[in-house]
Image: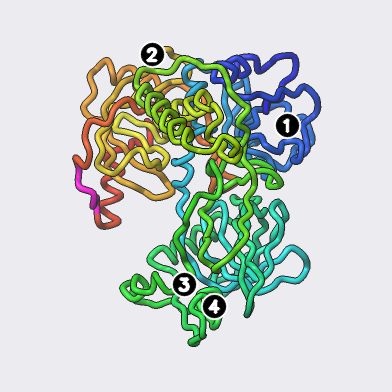
Amino acid sequence: MLFQRSGELSEFVDLLDNLGLSIDEQNGPLPTPKELAGACLAIVPGRLLIESNPPNLALWPPTVAVIDDSSKTLANHLNRLGVAMVIRRPVHPRTLRLLLLHQIYRGPERRANRRVLIGYPIRAGSGLFKSGATLLELSSTGARIELPTTPKIGSKLRVVLGKDLTHGKPLKLEGAVVRCIRPSAGKGRPQGEVGVRLLDPKRHAKAIRTIMDRFAIGPASWQAPSLRNESSVRAAVASKPTREADADQNSANRHLPPVHESSEPTCATEEIASFPDETAAECEEPIVDVLAEATHEAAETELKDDSTVPSAVQTEASESESIVSAQASHAHDDAAGAGHEEDDDSDRRRDPRSPYDQRVVALGKEAARVLVGRDLSRGGLRIETTDSVGLGDMLRIALHSGTQSDPLIVVATAVRGEGDEGTVLTFEELSPTQLDQLDEIIAGSTETMTCLATDLEEEARPVVLGEMLETLAHGVVSRSGPSSEREIADHLDSIFDAGESI
């Protein structure tokens, strides 16, 4: 969904139309969250967000703000409003294309937000009174909760983490239900399960991260009495869990809490945030074996509409294998469908969907090559954590400055993983010409800014956009890395020069 006045974002309209994406252009006032249902991205002029009564962007899909001046104050103000990214014009069309693809199609990378098994009793409810529940998993943007009464998808859920869990003051979180598994009626007290997207993940980011770090070596130990049904043991909160001081004991207890493997994905995209009444913001796998029988509900996603068949656009030669694979897959589906009875209308895969599927595969693969980095220097840079880059990988990447048409091609090696902080890449030896071009990127003001997800008060940090061209080798450096804190500090100091970082 794109908002503009007098065609001020016309280049975005042209680019999105060229990508074959459905665009809803709005020229009036900013909408309510319900009017944004089904949108996977909102693009808004930054001035319009500031001049209007600032909306609660926690209820919006990921929002990109576009500005035309170099005011750092303006960018920081938009950061505090909660935008996902600030784009400052002018920006080269290729850079803009990669940025938008990164925001829309980077599905596997979004799962880089780690989930930690917790298995701890909490309290949760939609109204004034809260009932006992179990926090099964926790991430920086959502949670998976087991509780006796499951609310409807889209409803708000308030969660209270007690001081025994936080090791401090009780923590009150508010989220929206995006997935629900309702238990069937049966003997005992069956438990349901919900997936919750936090409405304001930045507010308590530090406290959530502390809990996640504490449980990273294993979930809480469970000491439940013997019951006749093992599934009841897994679903009940029989006694207060305890944390073992010994890491080996914690590792051995990994199978004790009610944690189960998923059988199928809940929805087609991950963390493509939309209003909770319609779409799932952060998709987590359904825990279908909590009970023998359950009714599974999930918010709908945009990929459900088979009638959307956008026109084909040109893709790069490196994506041809994905398109060929998609064509072969559909040929196989058509051959398999030929053996079914003609009056079977339930097989939706018999409908012609190949143009849409090919587009998703091709654009998704292109988006997976996008690397968003920061802390750029002559020695290297830090990129967002992504499944496409493993520790020890040697890559050939293109660094886009934002305004120049010719990117800087460098060879870099992933030397250290820093969890949520990203992955450190170091550059191989650069030629004098490459160093001069890199100095221009460092010295110039970058044209894009991204907002940190940890603290609303932090300044918006400029980012450098990279594109992974080729993986040259895997595991060319030790995966252990520096061991002591002193070695880590010396290693980072050898890579990054504070005076040269942007």
Q: Secondary structure at mark 4?
A: helix
Circle 2 residue: 406
Q: Nearer the viewer, residue 156 or 375?
A: 156
**Magenta-colored span:** 477-482
Q: Nearer the viewer, residue 394 or 440?
A: 394
Chain-order first, disc 3 or disc 2? 3
Q: How is the image coloured?
A: rainbow
Circle 1 residue: 50
Chain-order first, disc 3 or disc 4? 4
Circle 4 residue: 232
Image coords of residue 419 (percent x, y)? 39, 50
Q: Please tell me whether residue 167 belongs to the stretch shown in magenta.
A: no
Circle 3 residue: 257
Q: Nearer the viewer, residue 25 or 317?
A: 317
Query: Which of pointers 4 and 1 indicates the residue nearer the eye?
Result: 4
Q: CA distance from mark 1 to mark 3?
A: 47 Å
Q: Say which quarter of the image contains residue 87.
A: top right
